[in-house]
């Protein structure tokens, strides 16, 4: 495919997917899981795509993970039969929507919790719908977002509440080492991964010692998974970002720019002494310069002339964004008005969420895939 001709025909801003790189990333992660004997349950909040999710399942994924009830409903409607919601659900109305859809499709849903309130609501709604619901206890391994600290004396009590409930099934413990994105090297990320593993195994062993079975020990976060040296005691991994990758795992040192499957195509619509101004602003690239408050020095993305994508000698930084404008530092270059540039975003997940479709570059041409669960935040 002659990409120069293709790019001239694509209206911008557009979110591009390189199918060859995407499939390489999917196969590599499934291969890693298979080699280590752990289940792969990818986090679909990254891509929000039924097409990509189906490819993950076809390659061997045991199911998918989502962040919200709305995302779960999209994938249930798309025929997915085993879904973990990795954010606590404490609203009765959300449980009712979820369980109604689950019952209609004979699917399995598993949801995390870290509180008595969450267990109570889940149990009440499961009983009302006549369904058994799988639940994980969320363990805080260092991000300090949701979850119980490993030394929390209530872990055993809460696990027992789930285990003893007639309408709930205790599936095990689950963590997300999101703080791994602050790592400065692959070695640092490996240390975070090993600390997470040791912590989760210790929590599991304490529960087992108290007579509670712990069928699953589930961990996530792409950089930690890619940097890990072993998964002893872990049963499941839930990376999400690996499908596309972006500047965050590249900065950590667990991926290369050439592995990144998602980019944004934009047009230079104006220019001045300091900047090329493009039509890809925060409504496309987002205003995200990192995750969990962790920022780098790559602005809102690395930009290249479309005909020189990933050429380090032609690299520029998207230094500023407003809603509909991106300001790319000229870095001594000159581009004409109407030129196309490609941007590797800092964080691909919110870029995908803002899009309504992907323009997919395949070996045979181009395709359009919908972002089926875009914007689903409830």
Image: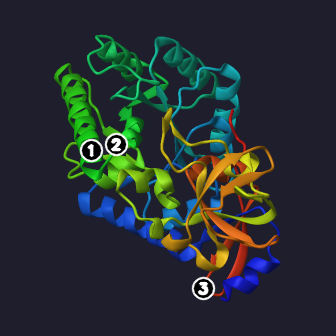
Q: Can residue 176 be seen in the rendering of this structure?
A: no
Q: Residue at x 81, y 79 (%)?
A: 9
Image quarter in which the N terminus is found: bottom right
The quadrant in which residue 189 appears is top left
Residue 47 is left or right of residue 97, and the answer is left
Lower position in the chain sequence, tag 1 or tag 2:
2
* Residue behind mark 3: 363
The residues bearing labels 2 and 3 have C-alpha atoms spaced at a distance of 35 Å
The image's mark for residue 188 is 1
- The 10 Å Cα crowd at callout 1, few under 14, some 14 to 19, many 20 or more, is some
For image coordinates 67% across by 57% down, the residue present is: 328
Q: Earlier in the sequence, mark 2 or mark 3?
A: 2
- Percent of width and height locating residue 365: 69, 84
Q: CA distance from mark 1 to mark 2?
A: 5 Å
Contact between marks 1 and 2 (CB within 8 A): the answer is: yes
Q: Secondary structure at mark 1?
A: helix
Q: Secondary structure at mark 3?
A: loop
């Amino acid at each position: 495919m002659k990409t120069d001709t293709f790019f001239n025909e694509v209206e911008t801003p557009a979110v591009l997917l390189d199918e060859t790189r995407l499939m390489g990333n999917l196969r590599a992660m499934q291969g890693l899981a298979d080699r280590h004997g752990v289940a792969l349950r990818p986090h679909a909040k990254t891509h929000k795509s039924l097409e990509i999710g189906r490819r993950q399942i076809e390659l061997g994924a045991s199911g998918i993970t989502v962040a919200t009830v709305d995302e779960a409903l999209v994938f249930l409607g798309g025929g997915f039969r085993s879904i973990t919601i990795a954010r606590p659900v404490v609203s009765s109305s959300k449980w009712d929507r979820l369980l109604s859809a689950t019952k209609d499709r004979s699917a399995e849903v598993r949801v995390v919790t870290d509180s008595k309130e969450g267990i109570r609501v889940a149990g009440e709604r499961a009983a009302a719908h006549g369904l058994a619901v799988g639940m994980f206890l969320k363990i805080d391994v260092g991000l300090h977002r949701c979850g119980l600290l490993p030394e929390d004396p209530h872990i055993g009590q809460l696990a027992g509440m789930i285990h003893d409930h007639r309408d709930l099934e205790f599936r095990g413990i689950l963590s997300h080492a999101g703080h791994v994105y602050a790592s400065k090297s692959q070695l640092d990320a490996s240390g975070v991964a090993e600390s997470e593993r040791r912590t989760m195994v210790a929590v599991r062993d304490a529960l087992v010692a108290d007579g509670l079975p712990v069928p699953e020990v589930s961990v996530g976060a792409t950089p930690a998974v890619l940097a890990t040296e072993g998964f002893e005691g872990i049963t499941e991994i839930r990376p999400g970002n690996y499908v596309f990758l972006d500047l965050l795992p590249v900065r950590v040192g667990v991926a290369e720019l050439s592995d990144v499957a998602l980019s944004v195509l934009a047009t230079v619509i104006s220019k001045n002494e300091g900047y090329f101004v493009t039509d890809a602003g925060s409504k496309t690239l987002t205003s995200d310069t990192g995750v969990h408050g962790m920022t780098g020095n790559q602005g809102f993305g690395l930009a290249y002339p479309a005909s020189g994508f990933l050429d380090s000698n032609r690299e520029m930084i998207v230094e500023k964004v407003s809603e509909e404008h991106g300001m790319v530092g000229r870095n001594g270059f000159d581009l004409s008005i109407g030129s196309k540039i490609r941007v590797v975003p800092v964080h691909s997940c919110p870029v995908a969420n803002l899009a309504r479709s992907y323009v997919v570059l395949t070996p045979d041409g181009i395709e359009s895939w919908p972002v089926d669960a875009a914007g689903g935040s409830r």
